[in-house]
Image (cartoon, rainbow, N blue to C red):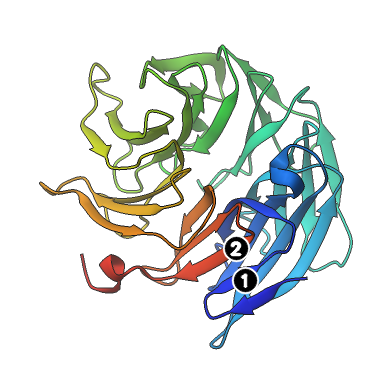
Amino acid sequence: MGTAGGGALRLPGLHGYAAEFSPYWPGRVACAAAQYYGIAGCGTLAVLEQNEAEIVLLRSFDWNDGLFDVTWSENNEHVLITSSGDGSLQIWDTAKTKGPLQVYKEHTQEVFSVDWSQTRGEQLVVSGSCDQTAKLWDPAVGKSLCTFKGHEAVIYSTIWSPHIPGCFASASGDQTLRVWDVKAPKVNLVIPAHQAEILSCDWCKYDENLLVTGAVDCSLKGWDLRNIRQPVFILLGHTYAIRRVKFSPFHATLLASCSYDFTVRFWDFSKPNPLLETVEHHTEFTCGLDLSLHNRGQVVDCAWDELVKIYTPSCLAVPV
């Protein structure tokens, strides 16, 4: 399975939902994908690696429902967690040929989001579901530690703060961005961020108070948690829903977004003309996006056109 050409790998019959660089291995990527656009059929976790000549498929693991998100372990370079359309999370070990190691099934509907905490001293995972709840997991424990209720529609995105231990944000179809503390299951903060479904959020790597949201209204908005009455920036340019947004690990004001308009866009919200570049190399909804921690400027994305691409956009090839 998988045919390569330059910085692209095709996953035949699979539509990409999420792509994440390994925090350990430069050039290694995990992609969560589904058959039949996630509406029916099975899912596959594909682990890829870029060498000098091409992208190669290292491992693939199949699941009996679509896979919608993936996150790498922060304490074991071989371990990943995926989230699925059947309401479950799967733990995989890429050093093994078969899997999963464990399955956690508590959500009652599709799980669209899963994220492993990045702060030292805790190994926690958060998931977000169509059942309107987020759940907290310790991968070493067979059941969830806590369930977070408050959203009034599907949760599309759950992301740990890279700064504050035990703090995560969630974005929902109820048009709100919420911030939670695992020590107090009630929501800390509710931000009515858009007048549309919010499909993605991310934390700035350089400012613990700054988050970005991406929504069906085609806009990206920045939020300072100390003053949530209005956004600190609004970025316009996408022509269909924004599916995923990621802050740069290297630049405080740079971020990337991908969209159902088939594009990936790169932005610097500190500039008068914030749109740096538009990359148009997919022919279907672009759903997965990540920026490498190891190779400065390197990006991975995936789309419903069966392609995973690893590249450096021209705007990141020179110092910003």
Mark 2, residue position? 307
**Quadrant holding the C terminus:** bottom left
Quarter occupied by residue 69: top right
The residue shown at (71%, 38%) is: 138
Place of residue 21 in the rendered image (x, y in percent of width and height, measured from the top left): 55, 62
Amino acid on which the number 1 mark rests in the picture: Leu
Is residue 90 visible in the rendered structure shown here?
A: yes
Q: Secondary structure at mark 2?
A: strand
Image height of 107 relative to 13, above or below: above
Place of residue 226 in the rendered image (x, y in percent of width and height, measured from the top left): 26, 23
Comparing 39 with 63, the one in front is: 39
Place of residue 64 in the rendered image (x, y in percent of width and height, measured from the top left): 87, 45
Farthest bottom residue in view: 53
Instruction: Mark 1 or mark 2: name the one nearer the start of the chain.
Output: 1
Q: Secondary structure at mark 1?
A: strand
Farthest front residue in view: 283
- Badge 1 density bin: few <14, some 14–19, many ≥20, Cα 10 Å: many
Quarter occupied by residue 68: top right
Mark 1, residue position? 9
The residue shown at (22%, 70%) is: 319
